[in-house]
Amino acid sequence: MIRLEVQKGDGVGRVVSTLSEPLRIGRAPGNDLVLETPHVSSEHARVVWSGDRYVLQDLKSTNGTVLVRGGVRTRIDDEVGRRVLLASGDVVELGSQDGPVALAVTIDEEADVARAVAMRSIDDLGPAVDQIERRPSALRSVYEQTAKIGGALELDEVLRRVCDAVLALVPKSTHVTIALRDDDDVEGPAVGAKSTAPATYIPVLTRVRGGQPSAASIPITRSVFKKVVDERAAVLLADAPAEAGTASMLGAQIRSTLGIPLWKGAEILGIVQVDNRGSLMPQPSGSTLAGAAPSGVFDEGDLDVLSVLASTSSLAIANARLVHRLHIVDERLRKENVYLKGREEKRAEGKEIIGSSRAMAELKGKLDKVVNTRVTVLIEGETGVGKELIASAVHWRSTRRDKLFVAQNCAALPENLLESELFGHKKGSFTGATDDKRGLFELADGGTLFLDELGEMSLGLQAKLLRALQEGEIRPVGSTKAMHVNVRIVAATNRNLEKEVAAKRFREDLFYRLSVFNLRVPPLRERREDIPTLAGHFLQRYTGEMQKPVGGFSQQTMELLQAYDWPGNVRELENEVQRLVIQLDPGGFATPDMLSPRVRHVDGVVERAQMKKGTLKEMMDQVEKFVLLESLREHGNNKTAAARTLGITREGLHKKLRAFGIT
C-alpha cells in the first residue's frame, strides 16, 4: 500500500492511500487528493501501479512536479520523462517552487511472492492448445467466445466481450478485471525525451457475475500482477490465501485466482485477473469445463482455456486500441480541417473582388465562364493587381470549393527545394530528407493549386510540371512510382510569357498548355473609377482594426489618389490608405499633405500628357485636355459616367470639350 501525507502547504495532515487503483492529485473536486492551492493544476499528477512498483506521473501540469530523494531534487518533465518510480521516504513537491505543496511518501511493502500452482508461458502455448483439443466441448466453447470477441471493433466492446467470455468459460469465476498499459506507454515516449520510466497499468474494467457490485476494495492483486509480468506467463493460484497470503488478497477475500497476460510481441499490454472471491457468488450447477474441482478453486483446465483465449483476446485488444487511437487522430484531423477550411472561406469572403469599372466587369464575366470548367487558367497582370485574389475566386466559386486551395510562389524557393515542395520526396532521397513528405500536388488533390510567379521556374522543373499537367501524374523525389492526382492548376505571372518563350527561357509546349484560358487583371491606372471604392474599402478595414473612427478623404485628396498612376497597383493603394489611417486623428479627414510625396506630386500625369512648354495657361490647358480625354477613354466615351468621375455636370463636360474642339 502507498500512503501520501500532506506535509507542507494546503491541507497539512491530510492522508490518502491506495493499493493498486490510480490515485489522482489536483485542484479539481474529482481528484482523490484535492489541493485547493492556485498554483496546483486541476489535474496535476497521479500515482499508478506498474505491476512492480508505484509510479508518479506528472500530467503536464503548469507549474511542474519535483521529486525529492535523499536531498536531491529532480524535476519531472519531458527532459527526464514525466514518470518516475516512487520509494518510501520520497517527498513530492507540487506547484510553485516558492511555496509548493509537499507530500510525504510511505510504501508498505508486503510479501509479494506468489507460489503459483501452474503457469503457461505465452512464448509456448502448445501444451495448453493440446489439452483443449482433447476436449471437443471446451474447444467449441473457446471457438464461440473467440468469434464473439473478434466481431467487435470498439475497445469498450472488446473488453466487455472478453470479460463475458471469461465468465462463460470459467463458471467458478466471480470477478474479472482487466488492466491495460497506459496509452502514453503504448504510443512510446515523447520526441526528444530521455526517459526510461517504467510502464504503468490502469484497471479499465471490472465485471462481476450476475451484475452485482464488487465487494473487493482493490481490482488487481499486486502479487499476481508481478508474477504474470515477470514470468510472461499465465498464472494459477488455486488456494490463493495459502499460496500468496498478502494483505491485498486477504482484504479482497480471494479464494482462488488466475492471472492471464495480454501481449503484443515482446510487450505486455495488460493483464486479466480472474477471481473467486470468498465464494461470494452462488456456484452454478454442473461441472466446469476443466472437470471436477473443489468448490471455488480453479484448476489447470481453467488455466489452459484462458491461456488459449488470451492469445486471440490480445490481438483483438491491440487492434481495438489501434482503431481507437486512429479514431482520435481522425477526429482531430477532421476538426482541424473544418477549422482551416472555415478560416480560408472567411478569408475568401473578406477578399471580394472590388470594382465596377468596365475593365473589371469584363474580367468578372470571363471569370464566371471558366470557374466550373477543368481547364488550366493563366492569370496575367502587373505586380500588386491582385492575381492571387482572382486565383482564389476561381477556386471558391467552383465545384472544387470543398477541397483545398494551395498557393506557392515559385520565385520563393530554389529549384531543388521547389521540386520537393511541389511533388514531395521519399525518405533518404537527399541529404536532410529524414521523413517522407507529401507535396503540394498531393495535398491539393481534388482542389486547386495556384502557382504564382510561374515565369521564375527553371526549364528542368517546367518539364516535370508539363508532365503533371498532361498526364495527371507526379513522382516524388526519390520515388520509383508515379502517383495520379486530380488538381486544377491556376498559374500567374507578371512576365510576358510569349517573349520568354522567344528568348528560350520558357518552354513553348508548357506555355500552350497553360494558356488555355487567360485572365488579364487590369492595372489600377486603367480603372481609375474604382479607386474611390477601393480606398473606402481599405479605410473601413484599417479603421476597424485600429479601432479609430475617421471622417474619410477630403475631395482634393481623393482627386490626387485618382490622378496617380499606382505602379504598385492595388497593393500600393492599400499601403497608402493604411499609412493615412495611422496618421489621422479620430474623426479627422485625410488631407493632401498626409499623402506620400510620390502620390501628392502626381508627376505621372504631367509626363503622360506630354505637355509642351508655353505659358502657364497653355500648359494647364494641355493637362486638362489630357485628363478629359483619358476619362472618356476609360468610360468608353460615356460622357455621363466621365463627368461623374470628374466631379462635374454633363453640361460642364460638354462645355469644356467644345472649348478644346472635341465633339
Image: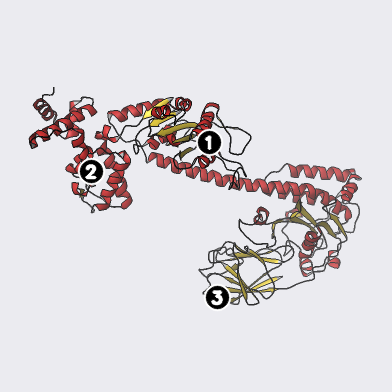
Residue sitting at x 32%, y 36%: 354
Q: Amino acid at mark 1?
A: Phe
Answer above or below: position of 341 versus 188.
above
Q: Is residue 342 above or below residue 627?
A: below
Which quadrant of the figure contains the N terminus?
bottom right
Spot occupied by residue 153 in the image (x, y as percentages of width and height):
69, 44
Task: Give the side of residue 656 with respect to residue 315, left or right.
Answer: left
| Residue carrying label 2 | 599
Tell me the CA gap for discs 3 and 1: 58 Å
The alpha-carbon separation of the residues under discs 2 and 1 comes to 42 Å
Q: Amino acid at mark 2?
A: Val
Tell me the distance, in whole angstroms, between the alpha carbons under discs 2 and 3.
68 Å
Instruction: Return the residue at label 1.
Output: 441
Say the numbered circle drawn on residue 174: none
Closer to the N terminus: mark 2 or mark 1?
A: 1
Nearest the eye: 448 or 414: 414
Quarter assignment of residue 390: top left
Q: Position of residue 277 (x, y in %)?
A: 79, 61
Whether pointer 2 and pointer 3 mark residues with C-beta atoms closer than 8 Å, the reply is no
